[in-house]
Image: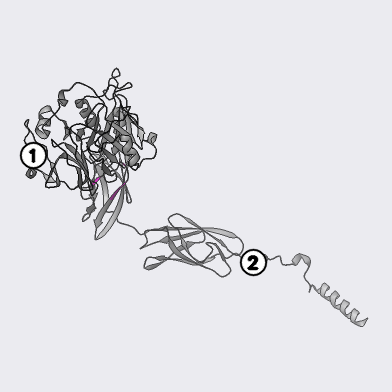
Amino acid sequence: MKRHFSLMTLLLGLLVGGGLASCSDKDDGEGDSKEIANPIASVVAVDGSKTANAVISDADKTIKFAFEELSDLTSVSVTINMTKGALLKTPSKATSTLNLSAPYSVVLHNGVKEVTYTMTATPKEILQPVVGAKVGDTDAVVEGQLITIGYKPEMEINAMTFDFSLLSGATVKSPADKTFNLELEDGKLVVTYQGEDYNYTVKVKDYVDPLLSKGWTNVTSSYGTLPNYIKVYKNEDLLNNAATKSIGYIAIMSPGKSTMGALGAGKDNKKSIYTFASEEPSWNVLLVGIESTAEPLIFRGGQFVQEGALYPFGTLGQDSKGVYKMAWSQKFDDKLYAFPYKPGSTYVERKKEEGTVWDAQNAASGLLMILWDGQIQTADEMICNTGINWGYPTDVNRYATSSIGLTPHGKVIAFCGQQINGSVGLTIPETAQVMKDTGCASAIVFERSSSPDMLINGQKTVDNSKGSVEASKKVQGAFGFK
């Protein structure tokens, strides 16, 4: 009893004296916590060969870097050191690789609650040696290392020449001629300044295809999958005469990307365009039209397949660098020679000394050169340069006609027109005008009537008078492009 009494007395005394805590005073886990006013002790980052210290504002909840060496902020090594009692939540590790090209949210617990700090950074200030740029009288916009020019109809999309304003001492490294082909892709400009190369991207905006205003419709998507450097167009009014319809197609191949093939085995193994398509399906574009007593030149892989006979016909070739050229050609000493234009009206046999060895990998001829240096050729010019004209310049008869041409900036344009099923065809001068209007500086023509034909990915374009697989006329050779 005494032990029991003594215990009761002790408990009573403690209660009266306040020695035991009441239930209302029980610690709930928060009562002793304190908010840490400066939860981040420091933030440092690797700045090239240096260490950058951030400026931290606990009032504004910001962390700011100003880098002296880093210009690319997409992958920055950052270390965040926390004050004792504070906990880092995002990023999950004290040292992390962060993308600081945009504001980054740092989340932490300051002892009482979660708070978010915004981390930002400014890159090394880069001197931009390009101060301004223009094409003709049109100013381009220079923003950092991006140069953008607004397109105007008078501009040549395949040869856009810029005038650059540079810091003193800066020079254009490439392209040396400051000229860009912006039809298919952005240009690349390299400027050297104080021993360092600066790379710029050159873009065009608001480009409008000039062929669309000349009656052509882009039908590329109708012919399956084609590389972006091959385009197909259709025109249902080549003569610009609603009462006299003439239908034609063109396929356009850009330089530096497309590959030309000189197909066929010549007069001893003639084939239809459908045979060419089935035997060599890799070619996106096939153009035929060479079948006559005249033998076209066929030059493949740097070797003669067929030498060509009678006359130096107009020829299209492509060298090992992908550059296209058009010229009159003949064989001398087992080599392919290219010959320049000759003024006059009398034909004199060519001598090899008048020409130059043509380093073509693949080349093939048509017949007459109907367009040269942007000028439609006359009867006398055809006689002087080829030795024959077949009466083409004055022939008023319209037929299905195919032609191939080259623009001043190296694009190949393959044309094929039809004569049946609502289309009257074209004369040679009309064909030459079509080639000129599409932008060609030079063009050659093929045999007319039933042989001209063009397939795109094996699909028909024109209707030919012998256009079925069975009846299609067999020819000595064909042009292929891919």
Q: Mark 1 = which residue?
A: 350
Q: Which quadrant: the N terminus?
A: bottom right
In-image side of 43 versus 229 (left or right): right
Magenta stretch: helix, strand or loop mostly: loop
Residue lying at the far front of the rendered structure: 268
Question: Relative to residue 477, is residue 421 depicted above or below?
Answer: above
User: Start and end of the magenta stretch?
Assistant: 178-188
Question: Relative to residue 302, is residue 87 depicted above or below?
Answer: below
In-image side of 168 versus 100 (left or right): left
On the image, the x and y values in percent for residue 5 come to: 90, 79
Q: Quadrant of residue 191?
A: bottom left
- Residue at left offset 17%, top offset 41%: 307
In-image side of 357 versus 214 (left or right): left
On the image, the x and y values in percent for residue 443 come to: 20, 34
- Residue at left offset 44%, top offset 64%: 77
Residue lying at the far bottom of the rendered structure: 2
Q: Which quadrant: the C terminus?
A: top left
Residue lying at the far top of the rendered structure: 243
Alpha carbon distance from label 1 to label 2: 102 Å
Q: Mark 2 = which residue?
A: 33
Q: Amino acid at mark 1?
A: Arg
Closer to the chain start, of discs 1 and 2, is 2
Near-viewer residue (119 or 445): 445
Q: Secondary structure at mark 1?
A: loop
Q: Secondary structure at mark 2?
A: loop
Residue 207 in sight: no
Quick check: is 183 in the magenta stretch?
A: yes
